[in-house]
Amino acid sequence: MWFLHNYLYRFEQLFGLSMLSQKQMLFAILLSVIPGLGQVYADRLYRGFTFYFGLIFISWISAIVFTRIDSRYITIVVLCIPFIYALAICADAAYCVVKPPQQTKPIKIQTKWYRISVFILITFSANMLMDYLIGKHIVRAFFVTTESMSPNIMKYDLLLIDKITQPLAGDVVLLEFSGNNKDESIFKIIESQTLRRIIAAPGDRVEIVGTQVYVNNLSIKEKYIRFGQSHSHNIYISKNYRWGPEVVPADSFFVLSDSRQYGFDSRTFGFVPKSYIRGTVSKVLWSWNLDDGHFKWERTALNIK
């Protein structure tokens, strides 16, 4: 615990510092908006890189663990770890200004800003590379812009998409109608990426009578669905509505919206090839209500059923 005592002692001496040192310390903390940049400003280049890549590693590990744990309270703790680490980086940046490295001669101001520029360039490139490698194959964030999956997934929810888990019937999945999988007829009526729930897997027989869905001739219980009102799509929640019966082809799925009045799902564009699925959704990361201008804290780490 000697390092904690050392930190506390240094900060107790804050008001004994010169006005210049106090300004430098505040500036280092502000620069820590880019984690590690405050350390670089305080002439601790390698320390800055260590903190930056440490935060990247911790954040991605936390995101992966977040999607794997069922307990909401444990996942909230996991979610807090990167933020606590970021605060520690700010505190360390201030400490580095208070106790600069031992040097034979001070670093020229041109050299200092050159180091800062190189650090920003490298960290920006590294962040894009990590986002591509991990975001494409392991986990990524997705911001919800529609109410087609409410009330389980609300508009303005921020989700983490699990790209490792194989999709099963009942899972909410991210579909992508773009790139090599782009279907022009679908793309005209639906966003390039959207969320839907898998109702039936390959080989299942699907039929819809009114608002009731039958899989393999058995009525399925769907506690997650909502029958709202929609002037343009009332046909989908009509008692006279019929779909099927049809058998799901190999390597395809039958998907539906949780809000059944939204008909842009397999009732409209048919079965979805497995190659269109970009991952499964199990939890809400957090939710920002743009209409009211505040966080929906009750939705943080909420399990999606």
Image (cartoon, helix red, strand yellow):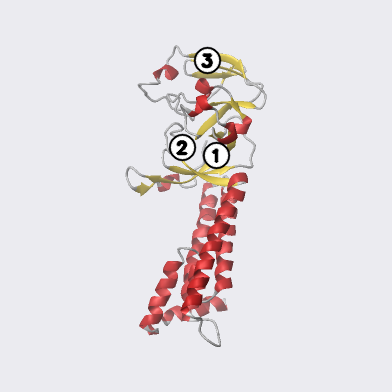
Q: Marks 2 and 3, how far apart in space?
A: 25 Å
- For label 3, the crowd category at 10 Å Cα-Cα, with few meaning under 14, some 14 to 19 and many 20 or more, is few
Report the residue at 52% width, 42% height from top: 283
Q: Which amino acid does the dot numbered 1 rest on?
A: Val
* Residue nearest the viewer, comparing 212 with 107: 107
Q: Which comes before the other along the chain, label 3 or label 1?
A: 3
Residue at numbered disc 1: 281
Check if mark 2's residue and mark 1's residue have beta carbons within 8 Å.
Answer: yes
Regarding residue 156, the answer to whether it shows in the image is: yes
Mark 1, secondary structure of its residue:
strand
Q: Are marks 2 and 3 in contact (CB under 8 Å)?
A: no
Q: What element carries label 2?
A: loop
Residue placed farthest to the bottom in the image? 104
Q: Which quadrant does the N terminus fall into? A: bottom right
Q: Position of residue 210 (x, y in %)?
A: 47, 15
Is residue 36 in sight in this rendering? no
Q: In this view, does 294 lie above or below 223?
A: below
Query: How far across and down, in percent of the image, does residue 85 sit?
Result: 52, 63
The mark that comes first in sequence, 2 or 3, is 2
Residue 300 versus residue 13 in the image, above or below: above
Q: Mark number for residue 243? A: 3
Quickly name the residue at label 2: 153
Mark 2 Cα shell of 10 Å, populated few (<14), some (14-19), many (≥20) = many
Residue 17: mark: none
Rendered residue at 45%/25% (across/down): 260
Q: Please indicate whether residue 140 sits to the left or right of residue 144 in the image.
A: right
Residue 95: where, in percent of width, then height?
Answer: 48, 76
Q: Distance between the residues labelled 2 and 1?
A: 10 Å
Q: Is residue 198 above or below residue 115?
A: above
